[in-house]
Image: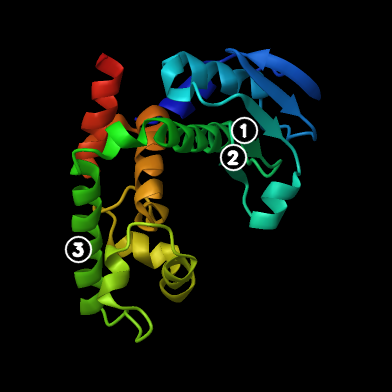
Amino acid sequence: MNNVLNYIKGASQNRKIKYLGSFYHSGIKVYVKDELPESVDVSRCLDYIFAKMPSFFYSKVKSIQIGNFTILQQRKLDAVYDNGIIYLSTNQEDDEYFISSIVHEIAHSFEEEYGESLYDDKTIENEFLSKREQMFRTLESQNLIPSYITREDFYNMNYDIRFDKYLYKDIGYEKLWYLLKNVFISPYAATSKREYFANAFECFFVHDIKEVEKISKNIYNKIVQYLEV
């Protein structure tokens, strides 16, 4: 069940407000520097996000800034979390994409704040590494591991641009998704432990909780534990 699409369909289509400048939402300063596409309703998206999520999940986020910022252009990204600020480019296709982008970056801010308790029992790390091992076996069986990629690369939990380029360019996310559909929530979740968590967090709050429970059970359990506190 896609919670975002149901929310968007159920919301009034006459609420769209064009924001340029600054305002506050849920205690967070929102600055819209450049116009978003007509298909994105900032107010409706923020209402959805912060109604779904307890405030301690985004307590480290001080500002959301939307526009064509240098930090995004330099990193060639549509969204990034940096030092208490979520930066979003104007390349947001629709409300669902906008919501997903923000929630994904909230996940990174939450991990930065609660990383020690999040990973202290190694359950998420072990889950991620077991999936990386499964990925290695699958790609090896398909003769898709080049000589410059070693087995040790699959056990590096940190983001490695060389490994990401191997997955994204050499194999392609579409093919990777076909081969590992029931292993990772998305191909990008395979790139590092941090992205594995952030993708599951995003799916939990935006797309399909049951999918997280099925594919990333240990992350599901952790999020539920935090919600029950």
Q: CA distance from mark 3 to mark 2?
A: 32 Å
Q: Which residue is mark 2?
A: 82
Is 11 located above or below residue 200 in the figure? above
Q: CA distance from mark 1 to mark 3?
A: 35 Å
Three-letter code, disc 3: Gln
Quadrant in the rendering for residue 217: top left
Q: Position of residue 227 (x, y in %)?
A: 30, 18
Q: Position of residue 87 (x, y in %)?
A: 65, 38
Q: Mark 1 falls on what kind of element?
A: strand
Instruction: Classify mark 3: residues with Cα within 10 Å, few (<14), some (14-19) or many (20+).
Output: some
Q: Residue at x 45, y 76 (%)?
A: 170
Foreground residue among 220 and 151? 151
Q: Quadrant of the C terminus?
A: top left
Count of numbered marks: 3
- Callouts 2 and 1 close, C-beta under 8 Å: yes
Q: Residue at x 25, y 52 (%)?
A: 128
Q: Which mark is residue 85?
A: 1
Instruction: Classify mark 2: residues with Cα within 10 Å, few (<14), some (14-19) or many (20+).
Output: few
Q: Residue at x 54, y 38 (%)?
A: 101
Three-letter code, disc 1: Ile
Q: Mark 2 falls on what kind of element?
A: strand
Q: Which mark is residue 163?
A: none
Query: Does the rendering let one see residue 53?
Result: no
Work out whether mark 3 precedes mark 2 in sequence or the reverse, and give the earlier one: 2
- Nearer mark to the viewer, of 1 and 3: 1
Three-letter code, disc 2: Asp
Q: Residue furthest bottom?
A: 147
Q: Which mark is residue 134?
A: 3
Quadrant in the rendering for residue 124: top left
Foreground residue among 188 and 70? 70
